[in-house]
Amino acid sequence: MAAPGRAHCGRATFAGLLAATVFFLLGWASAALLDPPAAPHAALGATVVDLAPAGLKDWAIATFGTADKVALAVVMVTVCAVLAVAIGLLGIRHLPWATAAVCLLTAVCAVCALTRPDADLVALVPSALAGVAGLLALHLLLQRAGGAAAPGDRRRFLTGVGATIAVSALVAAVGSLLTRSRSVTDAVREQVQVSEPVDDAPPIPPGTQVELAGMPPFVTPNEDFYRVDTAFVVPQVDPQDWQLRVHGLVDQEVRLTFDELLDAALVAATITVTCVSNTVGGDLAGNATWIGLPVRDVLARAGVDPSADMVLSRSVDGFTASTPLPVLTDDRDALLAVAMNGEPLPVEHGFPVRMVVPGLYGYVSATKWVTELEVTRFADATAYWTDRGWDPRGPIKTACRIDVPRSGSELPAGSVPIGGTAWAAPRGGPGAGAGGRGPLAGCRPGRHTGGGHLAAVVLHLGRRSSRPARGALPRLGRHRGADRAHRSPAAERRLRLPRGLRADQLTRYATAQTGSPHAPPSPANVSRSHRHEHANEQG
């Protein structure tokens, strides 16, 4: 059998890519009508996220930050394109083998869709339809491409390509219409009327915001709030269909609808949210004012068995978190949140309902799109991240970062002001909650967040060098200057720095001089801050 020529291989490559496009487009369009999470690309992405080792996820978040899902999508598109080209080249030589390869990939997508939480047999349909459409497109194009099986004709091949593109465009248009009709749009969110809380968060005192160019706002706007979670595709939950089920070691099972939740006695609290994957100086942290129903009220309605010590929360997409029971029943205002900064939750932040728990990293507490609370014991149940070797309780650590100047900036000689942010968990014995004494000395009680701006610090630089400083800076927390800074009563200090220091080096050096990011900030480091609570985003 003669080997295909260069022209035939080029056509086969194009045929494989077009067939893959038809496969994923039809799978997406049919899933939009039947079961959106069962779309082949969504099911594959969710499976990759679930099966990825914890270390790889940490690396992805540290490297790509909140764009980790975009990075995963790019990798998946690249891998699928390579497979499509390989199948096209295989098909021009041995069409039955290429057919078998498409059937195998269809089966993989179907299994990924069927193994999702709460999936049924309908989840198989999008992958099955996608497989049939992909095979038809591949056979049509390869027969016209020529090669070992047929002589082929360039005009016939281009006609087949045009027909395939036209059908793909039609499928894409239909899929887009179906997706918009079933998605939770801004219009749906705007119809949600969140009542005024019966207990509002105390106003943030004037002067809390450090007036320094480049400092982030004390309360982070929704559009700037970071997102870290395990959802490859953001779940679309209709609030009219949402329901919370509370069960397990309780006196009675409780079911709560969205309307019932909105009619309950809601409270407001300004809470810091930060991710366990946040690096030193990282931006995976922010403040928001949340409105919701305290979780302790729902648990009190159900009646918790004295033997229980954990609540396993479950998301609509299957994510689970194991939260210690005491932090949900004390007065720290762990919330079933329905609003964020004065508006209903953004879809990507958990609309219609999510959990926000001060004092814990989100992988054990901040379940988005929450639908279930199971009262249980740590000895009897595990959660998504604890199954992957993470600590089951996840208390947060005190941290701080330098926000100004930005990393990568070249600093002129002279006085350079720096500013930053610090956050900490609630401190005190059981029941201390927001009013307990903590590392933010002089803080006022109240439902405020665990984060506050650092005082402005003025650093005096020597004459600017034309080259960056070489050599490693001293390790964090190992300077005698750090001890002097903790004892200093001044809100403004001048520190001598090496010449030619870049902003990224300044961040590490200044953090070392003003306290380790994992050590409690001193009164000299905190400017006009008050008592705060702390919670965390998923992940």
Image: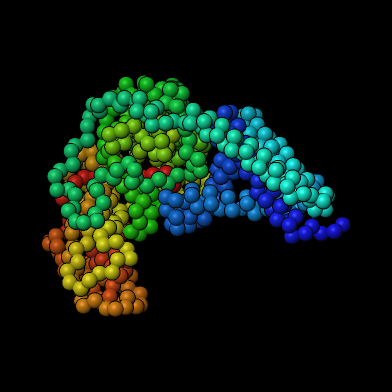
**429 up-or-down from 78: above or below:** above
Q: Residue at x 26, y 66 (%)?
A: 510
Foreground of the two, 247 or 271: 271
Does 243 sit left or right of 525 as displayed? right
Q: What colour scheme governs how the chains and residues are painted in the rendered image of this protein?
A: rainbow
Looking at the image, the residue that sits furthest to the right is 1
Q: Where 102 sits versus 458, above or below?
A: above
x then y, percent, for residue 275: 38, 49
Compare residues 273 and 82 and report the one nearer the observer. Answer: 82
Report x, y in % for residue 92. Answer: 77, 51
* Residue 248 visible, this orientation: no
Residue 381 is at least partly visible in this image:
yes
Residue drawn 35% across the image and 26% down it = 192
Query: Measured from the top left, where is residue 81 in percent x and y?
Result: 63, 51
State how many labels appear: 0
Q: Quadrant of residue 267?
A: top left
Please state if 164 lies on the left or on the right of 265 as rendered.
right
Q: Residue furthest toward the left?
A: 490
Quadrant that contains the N terminus: bottom right
The image position of residue 533, as x and y in percent, is 27, 43
Task: Please tell me which residue is depicted at 72% across the width and 52% down the height of the picture.
Answer: 12
Give the residue at x 22% y 62%.
Answer: 418
